[in-house]
Image: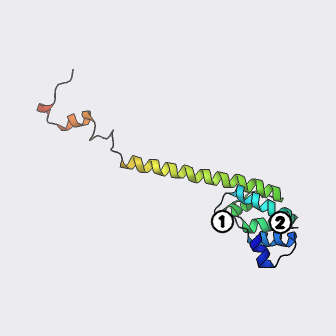
Amino acid sequence: MVDLKKEFGGGDDKTIKVAELKKIEQKNRKMEKFVQEFRKIARESGYKGRSLVEKFKREMNKVIKRKLMEVERPPMSIEQWYERAVNLDRHLRESRQEEKRLRGRREIEAQAPKLNTPENTNERQEQKLPQSQVWPRR
């Protein structure tokens, strides 16, 4: 806030909050943290209604924004945008983590020796030996 006062020449709190809203971006941080900060700044900025929603949409993660706008019933109010954006962000992050776990598991399985392949089972090895070298089964 001190940097903004220097940059914008002091000003009242409302002007400072508007300037802060112009600078805030979600980038890669969790939506929950972004919403908390955005809410705090927005309260004192004077932005309300549709203009606040538009500002929020402009600064949020593009993937989340696109997914929310493509649903059958997109959020309308700022509170709906906050709630649904946080939920979607959570689901996307969980999904990415699950994909990483599965990818790691597949890599481990690909590197592990194959235990039940015909080359590794005694039964298959016995069949490859000439009949004179195989013990009779009882």
The residue drawn where x is 20% and y is 24% is: 137
Give the residue type at disc 2: Leu
Image location of residue 21, percent across then percent down: 78, 69
Instruction: Report the side of 88 relative to 45 (left or right).
Output: left
In the figure, 67 relative to 11: above or below? above
Disc on res. 27: 1
Give the residue type at disc 1: Lys
The residue drawn where x is 87% and y is 65% is: 48
| Furthest residue in direction left, as rendered | 132
* Image quadrant where residue 46 sits: bottom right
Image location of residue 28, percent across then percent down: 63, 62
Q: Earlier in the sequence, mark 1 or mark 2?
A: 1
User: Which residue is denoted by mark 2 in the rendering?
Assistant: 52
The residues tagged by marks 1 and 2 sit, at their Cα atoms, a distance apart of 19 Å
In the figure, 131 relative to 106: above or below? above
User: Dot 2: what SS?
Assistant: helix
